[in-house]
Image (cartoon, grey):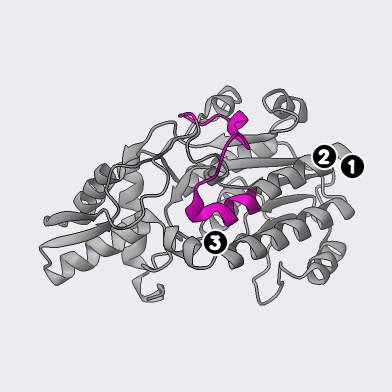
Amino acid sequence: MQPASDPTRPTYVAGHRGMVGSAIVRALRAQGQDNIVTRTHAELDLTSQAAVETFFAEVRPARVYLAAAKVGGIHANDTYPADFIYDNLLIQANIINSAWRHGAERLLFLGSSCIYPRLAEQPMPESALLTGPLEPTNEPYAIAKIAGIKLCESYNRQHGTDFRSVMPTNLYGPGDNFDLANSHVIPALIRKFHEAKLAGANHVPVWGSGRPRREFLHVDDMAAACLHVMALDASAYAAHTEPRNSHLNVGTGTDVTIAELAALVGDVVGFAGEIRFDPSKPDGAPRKLLDVSRLKALGWTAQIDLRDGLAQAYDWFLAHQSELRT
């Protein structure tokens, strides 16, 4: 990995307590990087422009991983749309602007595959951005993430910064949110199947028809991709991104149906009962598969098999049940 031009300046990981941020910290430390700065929400409110500006003025990080975000599944996005757009817009704008003002050498913004149109061509290339309507169930969150990409692009164009963006597919793994009301599909399924197994239930209800197809990436693979993209030579990064769509997709390049996923999770957990789908609940987009050819051309591919990754996620869940939100 290329060193920062001033090795005395730290790397700042925003959102280090989240699933992705904590994985990035683990990956950085595994590479021998110890000059890492983090702040909890109690220590630094990222929605406060004044607080973020003060932090950057004092710390002056050389590199910034912007993994902080308000996140959640279909139910959370549908219930709290104002929170999802407002909080994420503030977090992104504050960090990106302060990073520029205080001379950050590089910044990596983490977005989401929900930035692409609901009916985008599959697999979705980076060029699909802003070519059609978004999925209504998470449109406010998606718009905030699009704004983050455009903030990075705009600062690069106007101020000559080196701010980069990566768009991960659906992530899972250690540190995930297993709260049934607000979690994504994999942690929700793991918890549902585990609790059904303990209760001796004969079936598990699953939202939707089971037909939508989704791509899933282990969070440790995502962290590895982030470090890889951050380390790329500026000319190599620019050569594989478009001036107005300067982001890179991060995924596995393969997908499964929700029904196939549910069966796989049930097998990993050891639940032998029936899976009952509820088509009265929303499915979301019919398919979300990323075109990852650009990142592959830049030398990175995912390494963790879905079944192996699910087993790791379940092991983490079992080890941390006492800490989980109800």
Q: In screen coordinates, is 270 left or right of 211? A: left
Quarter of the N terminus within the rendering? top right
Give the magenta-colored segment's residue range. 121-145
Q: In screen coordinates, is 321 left or right of 6? A: left
Mark 3, mark 1: which one is toward the viewer?
Answer: 1
Does residue 50 appear anywhere in the picture? yes
Residue named by callout 3: 18
Q: Which amino acid type is shown beneath numbered disc 3?
A: Gly
Q: Tag 2, which secondary structure?
A: helix
Q: In screen coordinates, is 220 left or right of 232? A: left
Q: Which amino acid type is shown beneath numbered disc 2?
A: Asn
Residue named by callout 1: 159
Q: Is residue 202 above or below residue 145?
A: below
Residue at 48 percent of width and 49 percent of height? 219
Q: Position of residue 36 (x, y in %)?
A: 69, 57
What separation in Å lies between label 1 and label 2 (alpha carbons)?
5 Å
Image quadrant in which you'd find residue 166: top right
Most foreground residue, 97 or 141: 141
Most foreground residue, 43 or 184: 184
Q: Is residue 140 above or below residue 149?
A: below
Q: Position of residue 302 (x, y in %)?
A: 46, 35
Check if mark 1's residue and mark 2's residue have beta carbons within 8 Å. Answer: yes
Q: Position of residue 87 (x, y in %)?
A: 65, 65
Q: Is residue 57 magenta?
A: no
Q: Report the disc number at residue 309.
A: none
Q: Is residue 140 magenta?
A: yes
Q: Which amino acid type is shown beneath numbered disc 1?
A: His
Q: Report the disc number at residue 156.
A: 2
Quarter of the C terminus within the rendering? bottom left
